[in-house]
Amino acid sequence: MSRARETREVMRALSQLPNGLPSSLWGWDMTELSRAIVDGERRTLADGTELVLIKGRWYNADRGNAARFMRESKDEEVTRPERSEGPSKEELARRLEQLETSLLEGRISEETYLQLKSKYERRI
């Protein structure tokens, strides 16, 4: 199917939504929204539900089911935040200072200090 035809079909499905667009999509130009749906990143859940990513949120992309089409997905598999890259260099430097203070105050052993110091220094 051509992109133009698919975009028209998505526009038609959007105009037939029984409850209208979700509030998070209000204000979108219908042509732009249709293109975003056609061209957007897709994921399929374990139950077979196809989702499309629009402005950082996942929506049901099954335009054959008007009751569910464009409803925001609340599935944890999709909405779970991405893992961060870890603490910043400033945070690691702060942790090293705290580590040294803990050693000097006798709250941790020298062995623990050396292990953690090595771990933090590798990440800087």
Image: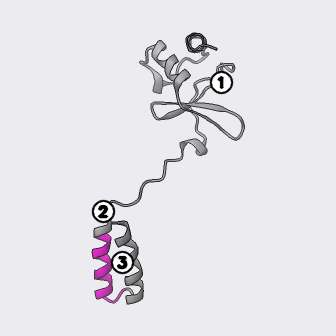
Instruction: Find residue 62 and name its label.
Output: 1
Q: Which region of the structure is painted magenta?
A: 94-107
Secondary structure beneath dot 3 equals helix
Is label 3 in contact with label 2 (beta carbons under 8 Å)? no
Amino acid of disc 2: Lys
Amino acid of disc 1: Asp
| Dot 2 or dot 1, earlier in sequence | 1
Inspect the magenta stretch and tell me whether residue 85 lies in it: no
In percent of width and height, residue 85 lies at: 42, 55
Q: Which residue is mark 2?
A: 89
- The one of 87 and 80 positioned closer to us in this rendering: 87
Residue at (56, 15) in percent of width and height: 3
Instruction: Find residue 73 and name its label.
Output: none
Judged by its main secondary structure, the magenta piece is helix
- Location of the N terminus (image quadrant): top right
Density class for disc 1 (Cα within 10 Å; few <14, some 14-19, many ≥20) is: some
* Mark 2–mark 1 distance (CA, rounded to whole Å): 44 Å
Q: Which residue is mark 3?
A: 117
Residue at (34, 72) in percent of width and height: 121
Inspect the magenta stretch and tell me whether residue 100 lies in it: yes
- Location of the C terminus (image quadrant): bottom left
